[in-house]
Amino acid sequence: MPSGRARPDGSLRALTAPTSVAVVGASSRPDKWGHWLASGALAGRDRRPVYLVNRSGGVVLGRSCFPDLQSLPEVPELVALCVPAGEVHQVVRTGLAMGVRAFLGIAGGIPDEDRLAAEVRAHGARLLGANSLGLYDAESSLCLAWGRFSPGALAIVTQSGQLGSELVIQCAQRDVGISRFVSVGNQSDLCAIELLEDLITHERTRAIALYLEDLSDGERLFGLLHTLREAGKPTLLLTVGESSASAQVAHSHTGSLTSSPELVQAAARAAGVLCVRTPRELASIAAGLVGVHTVTGRRVGIVGDSGGQCALAADVASEAGLQVPGLDADTRHRLASLLPTGAATVNPVDLAGAGEADLTAYATVVDTVLADPSVDTVVLTGYFGRYGTDVPSLTDPELQIAHRLVAMAREHGKTVVVHSMSPRRQLAETLTRRGIPVTDDIADAMSTVRGLASLQGATPPTVPARGATTSTIRPGYWAARSLLQEIGVPTPAGRLVQDAEDIHDTTTRLIGPYVLKADWIEHKSEMAAVHLGLVDENAVLSAFDDMRARLGPGEYVVEEQDVRPDCVEILVAGRRDDALGPFVVVGRGGTETEIWHDVVTERAPVSRESAAAMIAQLQCAPLLDGWRGRPPVDMHAVADLVVTVSQLVASRKDVGVIELNPVRVAPDGVLAVDAVVVPTDPSSPTPPSTKDPHP
């Protein structure tokens, strides 16, 4: 994603709300771009002058065409380029000489496109594209794109034009209108970040759908998305699994434990952005975002008119990470009085034919479940919405129930989502436009609930990074120990040794048993570069002679071995991704870390509450809480350690990776017994004696 460019004009008004438009390459053929852009431009002719340009002249859509830009009666503020790639340079240069302020480039494969963009910027103008599918803005009645748009509250910014079109179609099927559509194309000049910045003050936009493949400027991007979220405009992000967010190559386990998709997810969570998997899922959640007035939480009450559909809805809710709580006694008692004998009243609630006998049962039962304090959202699943299709005389009664559902959702301040076997257009519009999403798939319904619940409330608080430490990043375990001690992380008592005399002096000062380590080797177990359980000086000397014979001369470390009972080994690490910034990782530690891949990653820095939540998500969390009668470890110390490492990697851009593995955690605190620090500069020297086989 391009960044760091001078912006000739801080506003994109000339592009999104131009005072006049010229379509160069206008065509009367409906299968040509020039026809679609001419037609769209003319739809806004009551807002601005629109000029059609065709070298052959003639008439397009009832309007006479001008042969070239110089023939126009005024200088157009925006020029849409629907000409072959080889002709784009000449048209743009003509426009720049005239004073055109913005260009929309449709064609791909423009020769020397970067030079063209530089010329545009040098003249104080802007270029969207090239290779763009176009631009639409409901606020300014501007439509210069392939496709049809209905005005609404969702902005779409997309790197793929055709996928953007799919998003528009999926949203239209759910009665979600578009406030602005921008296909960024090749981003040779204007980039997605600038176009997103412009949405902060775009009044019509209430939510944003974003598709990007290039996250190379991800730290800046997610910072902006956080700003948009704070402005009340949450973002739904669709991206490919292998984004261009770089994977930090480091001499540690951490690089293999955190993939680009995991980092993107963590960056999104920190920014209050929701990642989605498909255009359909995005559109389903968007229907809720732009319409629902109140979003509460993940506790779902399910109401249906089929036992099978109710059961399936409960399973799908669970798979989506939602809760299906039992209803309280008062709610169950009231439901029992409303429904036939034997109807399920716990949750899910089965109408058991009550809806067929009296349509108002749908509204009455939903109202009752909404009133239950253990329920945040009600999903109505089944036949409702099809009555009017099969029995036309029931159309109006069904619509009356729909209006009651809208009123009840607002009265209770909770969310209602409808899954219907036949979401008829009129019924769907009645509900969707008043804040109740409608879908024909139960998985979509639960995705909507999950998405809305994930985006509810405030984003995580900003955690101030600690002041930067002063230690120079140097290779080796001893240097890593020094940095840990500087930030207050407990390490074992130890000393550097190089010969027998050092070992004699060290073993008289430290308490056995001892551990001997080769300082410069990072994966010590694989290289037999660590010896544990050395009971006395002779044992240390013997291990030292063996290790030096195999690994060569260098600095070795002797430490007191941690022999505290009831210890659990964990990993705590930080890494700085080239594209997305700093992250902190906590996971199961020890020599089998990569096998279990039991890790949780979040954007750094994190708060103490966030650190505790990370630890609770680990599969090995029960070992920390106390397992089979063992005492629980010091969880406060673990959380504090995660916070400390997160603050370090956030405050020091020269720390590429810091990994503490293992950290031994006992009831009386934590002890980091091995560590590695890798600088961000890949050219930093590594001692020539390193024989570690792991890149």
Image (cartoon, helix red, strand yellow):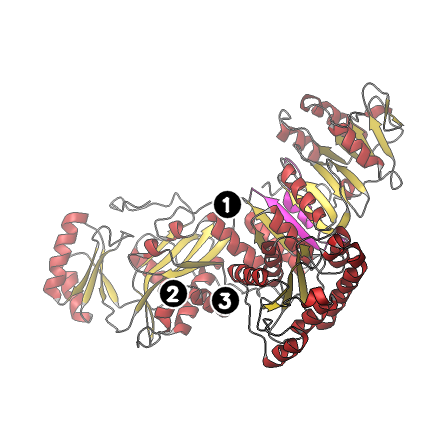
Question: Which amino acid type is shown beneath numbered disc 1?
Answer: Gly
Point out the frontmost of discs 3 and 1: 1
Determine which residue is flagged by label 3: 610
Q: Earlier in the sequence, mark 3 or mark 1?
A: 1
Residue sitting at 62 percent across and 35 percent down?
A: 186
Residues shaded magenta: 188-214
Q: Is residue 330 left or right of residue 39?
A: left
Determine which residue is flagged by label 2: 486
Percent across and percent down for residue 216 are 54, 44
- In the rendered image, residue 276 lying in the magenta stretch gets the answer no
Question: Which amino acid type is shown beneath numbered disc 2?
Answer: Glu
Count of numbered circles in the view: 3
- The image shows residue 270, relative to residue 281, as above or below, that is below
- The image shows residue 151, relative to residue 435, as above or below, that is above
Q: Earlier in the sequence, mark 1 or mark 2?
A: 1
Q: CA distance from mark 1 to mark 2?
A: 38 Å
Percent across and percent down for residue 504 are 13, 65
Point out the frontmost of discs 2 and 3: 3
Q: 440 or 114: nearer the eye?
A: 440
Q: Residues within 10 Å of mark 3 (few under 14, many from 20)?
A: some
Q: Quadrant of the C terminus?
A: top left
Percent across and percent down for residue 255 are 39, 50
Q: Is residue 51 left or right of residue 304?
A: right
- Is label 2 in a helix, a strand or a loop? helix
Q: Which mark is residue 241?
A: 1
Q: Earlier in the sequence, mark 2 or mark 3?
A: 2
Question: Which amino acid type is shown beneath numbered disc 3?
Answer: Ser
Q: CA distance from mark 2 to mark 3?
A: 24 Å
Q: Residues within 10 Å of mark 1 (few under 14, many from 20)?
A: few
Q: Quadrant of the N terminus?
A: top right
Residue sitting at 68 percent across and 28 percent down?
A: 107
